[in-house]
Image (tube, rainbow, N blue to C red):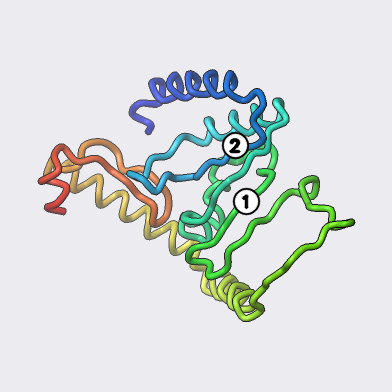
Amino acid sequence: MAQFEHENRAEEDRCLANIKQMLQGVGAVIVEPISSHENQLATPYFFRQLRRLCTAEGVQFIVDETKTGMGASGKNWAHEYWYLHEAPDFVTFGGKSGLGGFYSTREQRMNDEGVSFSQNLDMKKVLNYGKTWEIVADQNLLQLQKDTSSFLKIELDRIGRETGIIDGQVRGYGTHLGFDCHTEAQANSL
């Protein structure tokens, strides 16, 4: 991304301007930190500006961490890399966490007065989730994830320079890395 910083900023500003025009009457914007399709991602600048825009327009800002949560990015939640000025209104999670759900800001908490909530919590899954995070913390696995990811990025960049197979910079966080190849045949050879 650094190689095309100015081009990326111009494209992200163009996209933000288009989004602003589309927000009237919208209740929520849902984003993935890293797209599962082709490992596409925007810069932290884009997400900070999008969060500000949603706040200004009264639109809920929801981050879908189903694929990127649980430390897969090297942080508990991939959106932590954005250094937002204001937390997302909601964060959804599931997948590898073994437990699906969401959390929200205090302002977005549901009021249960006069509303019946059906909570089908599997306490075994809740306890497993807690134990998993205990192990992650005790064994410093998030730092190991970041270190391993950094090493892998360096090695993939080296392979790209030496072989010419990889076209462009390696991007992403943790286990969510992406890069482009010159041809599909070269991609298959990796």
Locate residue 167 relative to residue 15 in the image: left or right: left
- In the image, which disc is placed on residue 127? none
Q: Quadrant of residue 171?
A: top left
User: In the displayed structure, would residue 19 be above or below residue 113?
Assistant: above
- First in sequence: mark 1 vs mark 2: 2
Question: In this rendering, is residue 118 above or below 155?
Answer: below
Name the one closer to the observer, 51 or 73. Answer: 51
Q: Residue at x 50, y 44 (%)?
A: 32
Q: Which residue is mark 2?
A: 29
Q: Residue at x 77, y 63 (%)?
A: 117
Residue 91 is marked as 1
Q: Is residue 167 left or right of residue 175?
A: left
Q: Secondary structure at mark 2?
A: strand
Nearer mark to the viewer, of 1 and 2: 2
Q: Amino acid at mark 2?
A: Val
Q: Position of residue 166 (x, y in %)?
A: 20, 42
Give residue 57's quadrant in the image: top right
Q: Secondary structure at mark 1?
A: strand
Q: Nearer the viewer, residue 166 or 55?
A: 55
- The answer for how far apart the CA atoms under marks 1 and 2 are is 12 Å
Q: Position of residue 120 (x, y in %)?
A: 68, 71
Categorize mark 2 by other alpha carbons within 10 Å: few (<14), some (14-19), many (20+).
some
On the image, the x and y values in percent for residue 112 come to: 84, 57
Q: Is residue 47 above or below residue 163?
A: above
- Amino acid type assigned to the residue bearing label 1 in the image: Val
Q: Is residue 169 above or below residue 151?
A: above
